[in-house]
Structure formats: C-alpha cells, structure tokens
Amino acid sequence: MSFADLGLEPKLLDAIAAAGYETPTPIQKEAIPPALENRDVLGIAQTGTGKTASFTLPMIQRLGRGRAKARMPRSLVLAPTRELAAQVAENFEKYGANHKLSMALLIGGVSFGDQDAKLTRGVDVLVATPGRLLDHFERGRLLLTGIEVMVVDEADRMLDMGFIPDIERIFKLTPMTRQTLFFSATMPPEIQRITDQFLHNPVRVEVAKPATAADTISQRMVRVPIKDDRTKRAALRELLTHKDVRNGIIFCNRKSTVDVIAKSLQKHGFNARPIHGDLAQAFRTETLDKFRSGEVQFLVASDVAARGLDIPNVSHVFNYDVPIHADDYIHRIGRTGRAGKKGAAMMLVTPADAKFYAAILKTTGAEEIEALDFSVFFEEHAAGGGHRRPSRDKPDDNRSRPRRQPRKPEERKPEPAKAEASSEQPKVEANKEPPAPRRRRSGSTSAPKRDNAEPIIGMGDHIPDFITRAVAG
Ligand code: AMP
C-alpha cells in the first residue's frame, strides 16, 4: 500500500516523497483514511511508530481548504512537553511545505508577545502545551470556538503529568462539532473515561508496542557491585568510551543528578550537556539543536525532557539510573534504534535497583538483560581508590559536585510564572526529583575535588551528625 492509496492529495504526496518516506507505517495506514473522512480516531501507539504524520497529514489536507480568522485557530494539537510540541510543529512545517498554512507554537519559555502577534493574525494550526494554551486563553487572547480539529498527543503522559483536568477544560472550550484525533500509548481508566466522554464514535487503531521496535536495539547492562556514585560515574565513563559509541543520551532519574553527571562528564573532557525541565527553554532548544547537529555528543537527560524526542541517529542510550517506572525504560531505549536503524542501550544496575530491574524484565518480557563483564574494571577501580569510602545512600550525590562553579545565568530560567509552575512544570518530574539535600557548609568548604582526587582516607569531607551535635548535659 502506498501513501497515494490512503487518499492523500498530490501536494502532500510530494512533501512525503521529499521527506524520503516510501510506504506508510501501520498506524498511518489505519488512521489516515478515517481521519480524512473527518472521523474521530483513537490511536493507541507509541512514539517511533510514525503517529505524528498520521494526524498531521490529514489535518493539512483538511485545513488546506478555508482560511483562519484572527484569534480563532482552526485546529489545535496538545502535547505534554515543549520539546514534543516543537517536534509536532516541525512535522507540520515538513509535510505542509507545499501548503500555505499558518501555525503558532504556544509553549512556555517563549515570549508571550511573539505568540500573541501570530494569534492576532490568525492561525490554521495551533500547537501547544496545555498550561501555556490556558494562559493565553485566560488573558483573553484566543478563542477556541473555531476549532475544527483537535489532537491530543501522548495522553497517558499528560495523565502522568497531571494535565488531565486541563485537557478536559480545553475540550469543553472547543465546539462539539470538532473532529478529535486522540493518541495514547496505553489506555488507563482515566484516559478511557476522557475518550468515552469527548470522542464521537471513534475508529480505534492499535499498533504494536515498541517491544517489537526493540529488535533493532541491543540491550546490555553492567552490574555495579556497590551503590557508590563515584564508581557509577567511573563505570559510565567507561561505557561512553566504548568503540561503537558515536553519540548518546544518558538518562538519570533526577534533575539534580542530570546536572551532576553533565558537569562531571565535562570535567573529564566529554562533550556533554544537560537537559531537564528546570533549564531555560533557550538553553534546552540550543542543546537539542547542537545534539542533533553533532556539535554535542552526549545529552544528559531526565525522562520528561527527553520524552518523545525524535532525534535520528542516536547510537546509544545509557541508563545511568535504572528507571523507577518500567515504562520509562521502554521510552528511554526507544530514543535509539529508530526508523529501523541499529541502536544500543546500556544500563548501570546497582544492588539497590533490584526491584526496578525486575519490573523492567517483566515489562519487556525478557528473562535477563545480558550483563557486560566489568569485573576487571571494578577490581582495578577498587584497587586504584583503595580507601575510597562508598557514599551513603543519599538521594543525590551533591557532595561530589564540583565546587564553586557558578551556574551560567542562561542555563537557569527565572522563577517560573504561576501557570508554568502549576501545569507546564511536569509534575511527575517534580515528584521524581525532590530537592537535593542542602550541603553542609563545614563539609563543603574543605572538600577535596573528588573524581580525580587522591584516595580519601578517613571521613573525607563528610562530618557525621554525631560529631556536630551538642553533647547533652
Ligand atoms: P513518530 O512516531 O511520529 O515520532 O515518528 C517516528 C519517526 O519515523 C520520525 O523520524 C518520522 O520522520 C519517521 N517516519 C514517519 N513516517 C514514516 C514513514 N512512513 N516511513 C519512514 N519513516 C517515517
């Protein structure tokens, strides 16, 4: 079956050919024909399946007829994160190259003024994160009564991030006559309830989970014998220098760990940059662009920031931390091995991760993930740092953060606006990443540099609580 068989018009077929696609993916085959008939579609599919084109192509065809009015967008795509929204917008640009559609992207971290000016001129396609969209709506800058097509992308992720009340509210602001294209990787009861309420007789399209996509991804793990952050970082560096590693995304469970690892890698001469939800949007965009262009080799990322990113040609995914949610493992490793290319995923597993590791095996249906033999490395590492004290089981390794390196101002965004904090700041990430414990002043001022430091003897920079506590009586 070809794209022409799906009922797409020649202008779109040209854009598809220019994108280099020859045959439609399963979700495109099943979702595009009913979407072109203006039917509602419920697509159960993950990223990597070609789902973005399955809604953008029919939307472009439909919106090719008619004109936009000021402040009344004709279609709306809701995405959970800024990066994902930006990616959808790129898809519209790519497939809509031969159409004259106007588009606005409403995401946090971008000035209201520019977005507002576009809305005033009138847009055919509005791509937005829920928080920013409602911000504009509440300022009276936009009306949703002209929406002909509404798309909800990655609905289950929206649920994880606490966006479902926003989505319900947005649905209610759009006309009942709209066409709805709704995508979710899974269908938990809350999502089912939303689709029952807001979709009209939808065509249900379900495509295989990327457990099958993982055929192109070789998965390996390294058993780190102790939960010691320095040993973990050393093991990570060892993995990064593996001969086949061209570039990679390194996932951490916490934003604070992302910062620590990025800095540590930079200190060791690796070309790495962090990306997570607390970094300024301009910095995140620049980092992604540089990673895409090859200027940056390693992206150190949190789950939410990297969710759904379509970055072609990622040779490796590294799980510095075992993900707490097994689903995140699938999403993480899905950043490599895309579009049929070969990819590799490597994970560091400490004894403390046993429960999460078992959950990953259950979800992926694998009996084991092949372990790389790092016994010599750990022996040598232990021998080299004979008296190294394993770090205590703290939520994050702040003590070894290179000291007194003031964060560059552009890397931090200012205090988030209220709506940003309440809705666009991903709640799940906030949950996963509690604030790092404050460093003890006395310890940090005398701390030696860690990663290259002489073996630490005795207590190092750490002063146990009992020493600082006043003696009773
Ligand atoms: P998505 O699931 O929408 O994130 O798409 C995953 C990747 O597949 C993107 O890089 C798309 O450009 C690519 N893609 C989408 N449709 C096709 C197709 N029919 N043939 C080849 N690649 C495609």
Image (cartoon, rainbow, N blue to C red):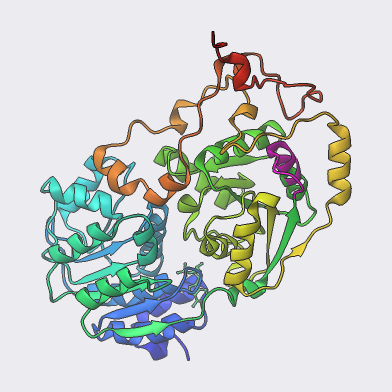
* Residue 257 appears left or right of 201: right
Across and down, in percent, residue 202 comes to: 27, 83
Across and down, in percent, residue 407 comes to: 51, 26
Across and down, in percent, residue 387 comes to: 83, 28
Up the image or down, 17 lies above or below 373; here it is below
Q: Is residue 204 visible?
A: yes
Which of the image's four quarters has the C terminus? top right
Q: Nearer the viewer, residue 456 or 329?
A: 456
Residue drawn at x 57%, y 47% as measured from the top left: 252
Residue drawn at x 35%, y 66% as measured from the top left: 155
* Residue 244 appears left or right of 64: right
Across and down, in percent, residue 116 comes to: 19, 46
Q: Nearer the viewer, residue 272 or 100?
A: 272
Numbered circles on residues, count: 0
Q: Which residues are magenta?
A: 224-235
Q: Is residue 117 visible?
A: no
Residue 90 position by quadrant: bottom left
Up the image or down, 399 lies above or below 382; here it is above
Q: Residue furthest top?
A: 473
Residue 218 position by quadrant: bottom right
Residue 108 position by quadrant: top left
Residue drawn at x 50%, y 53% as measured from the top left: 303
Up the image or down, 23 lies above or below 426; here it is below
Q: Is residue 226 magenta?
A: yes
Q: Is residue 43 magenta?
A: no
Q: Nearer the viewer, residue 114 or 146?
A: 146
